[in-house]
């Protein structure tokens, strides 16, 4: 049998998780929070590693105490593995979690977080309703927490593990999310479809704005143009008066206008896209949608020529989670990290079959 892994502290595990699961990892919070570190610690502690035929359940995690976790002797570790599943067993000391944390450990940390990434394997021959231990660490993943590995070697091993184990779509999300973060070290240069360019102040909102103009617009519009682009430090960074006048849209700085206005000139009648960029707050809400419709109604545009998009960094971002419930119906959400996809907030007027149609 593979030897039991070397003893490692929960603190070291918690420190390494954000490196192993960088920005853009699906359900990243479930993979890097303290509960994830506690779960991985418990698996390493009892030796629940692929190839050892040892497994844990949530009970091993929520019965762990600080005093038990400090006992690094191999015999103590093995004894805890065997005793934790016994009904009346409880090690001495202060417990990390209460019994009612069984569900978040199982459903969030394991099923939604670490298992889909390949970090944890499960016994496939157990019924889903079985309470028997079924989870173990993938061997290569467990090696990332060896406390004797030098920091430089750890970073290289983490990168190699990501390449081998995360799905292609997950790696794409990580790559795009990481690229935008690195771009924030200086000014952000945005190149418009007509070849003009503007420098925006560095920051997450500018990263998203750049992606809307350079990635979203050519991907989803036939002949895209930028009518308007604003930032928090410069309300009007760019305004194409010529096109705005040609199509009859009078654009003036207003609190209800979004960060970006695009137009698709490749259609017989122009399609105007109002895009709000959200790093932390400010989605296209019903109220703002109504205010913008007043502007376009006054200019004589039909409402089927107008659409709304709220642009985010990633589905896991705090901004999306905070504003999702306020997004207006009949608008879209787009994510820098998943540039070929849109979420349509469709009202219920149509049957599902018609929508999918």
Image: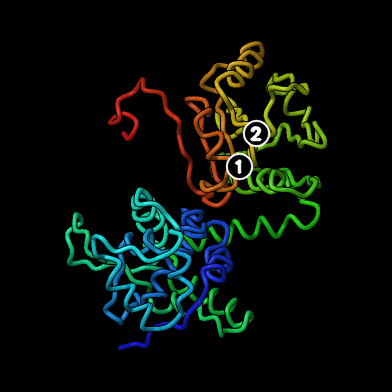
* Percent coordinates x, y for residue 235 in the rendering: 80, 31
Depth order, front residue of 81/328? 81
Give whichever of discs 2 and 1 has the lower sequence position.
Answer: 1
Q: Quarter holding the N terminus?
A: bottom left
> Disc count in the image?
2
Could you say which is closer to the camera, residue 50 or residue 265? 50
**Residue 123 circle label:** none
Give the crowd class for mark 1: few <14, some 14-19, many >=20 residues within 10 Å. Answer: many
Q: Are marks 2 and 1 in contact (CB under 8 Å)?
A: yes
User: Would residue 109 appear left or right of 237 to someone viewing this image?
Assistant: left
Q: Residue furthest front?
A: 92
Instruction: Name the residue: 51% across, 46% down.
Output: 315
Q: Position of residue 25 (x, y in %)?
A: 50, 58
Where disc 2 sits, the SS reads strand
Disc 2 crowd, CA 10 A, few/some/many (<14, 14-19, 20+): many
Q: Residue at image x 47%, y 59%? A: 31
Residue 125 falls in which quadrant of the image?
bottom left
The numbered mark at residue 217 is 1
* Any part of residue 319 in sight: yes
Q: Is residue 63 above or below residue 341?
A: below
Left or right: 293 in relation to 36: right
List x then y, in percent, for residue 104: 38, 50
User: Picture quarter containing residue 154?
Assistant: bottom right
Element on which disc 1 rests:
helix
Q: Position of residue 278 (x, y in %)?
A: 63, 38
Residue drawn at the location 65% of the way across and 60% of the way down: 179
Q: Nearer the viewer, residue 128 or 263?
A: 128
What residue would you read off at disc 2?
262
The residue under the point 75% across, 21% down is 254
Q: How far apart are the alpha carbons under marks 2 and 1?
A: 8 Å
């Amino acid at each position: 049998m593979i030897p039991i892994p070397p003893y490692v502290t929960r603190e070291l595990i918690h420190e390494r998780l954000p490196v192993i699961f960088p920005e853009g990892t699906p359900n990243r919070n479930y993979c890097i929070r303290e509960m994830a570190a506690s779960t991985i610690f418990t698996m390493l502690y009892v030796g629940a590693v692929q190839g050892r035929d040892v497994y844990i359940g949530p009970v091993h995690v929520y019965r762990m105490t600080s005093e038990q976790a400090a006992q690094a002797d191999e015999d103590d570790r093995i004894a805890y593995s065997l005793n934790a599943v016994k009904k009346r067993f409880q090690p001495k000391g202060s417990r990390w979690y209460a019994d009612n944390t069984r569900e978040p450990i199982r459903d969030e940390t394991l099923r939604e977080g670490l298992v889909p990434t390949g970090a944890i394997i499960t016994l496939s021959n157990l019924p889903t309703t079985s309470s028997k231990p079924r989870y173990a660490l993938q061997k290569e993943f467990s090696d990332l927490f060896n406390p004797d590995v030098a920091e430089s070697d750890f970073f290289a091993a983490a990168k190699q593990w990501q390449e081998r184990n995360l799905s292609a779509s997950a790696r794409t999300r990580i790559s795009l999310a990481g690229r935008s973060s690195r771009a924030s070290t200086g000014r952000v240069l945005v190149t418009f479809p007509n070849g003009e360019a503007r420098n925006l102040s560095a920051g997450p909102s500018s990263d998203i704005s750049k992606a809307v103009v350079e990635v979203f617009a050519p991907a989803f519009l036939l002949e895209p143009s930028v009518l308007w682009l604003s930032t928090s430090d410069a309300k009007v960074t760019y305004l194409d008066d010529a096109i705005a006048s040609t199509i009859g849209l009078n654009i003036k700085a207003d609190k209800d206008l979004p960060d970006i206005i695009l137009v698709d000139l490749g259609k017989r009648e122009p399609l105007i896209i109002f895009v709000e960029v959200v790093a932390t707050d400010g989605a296209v809400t019903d109220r703002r949608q109504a205010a913008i419709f007043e502007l376009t109604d006054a200019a004589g545009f039909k409402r089927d020529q107008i659409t709304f998009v709220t642009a985010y960094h990633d589905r896991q971002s705090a901004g999306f989670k905070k504003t999702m419930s306020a997004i207006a119906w009949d608008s879209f959400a787009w994510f820098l990290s998943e540039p070929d996809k849109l979420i349509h907030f469709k009202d219920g007027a149509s049957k599902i079959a018609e929508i999918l149609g």
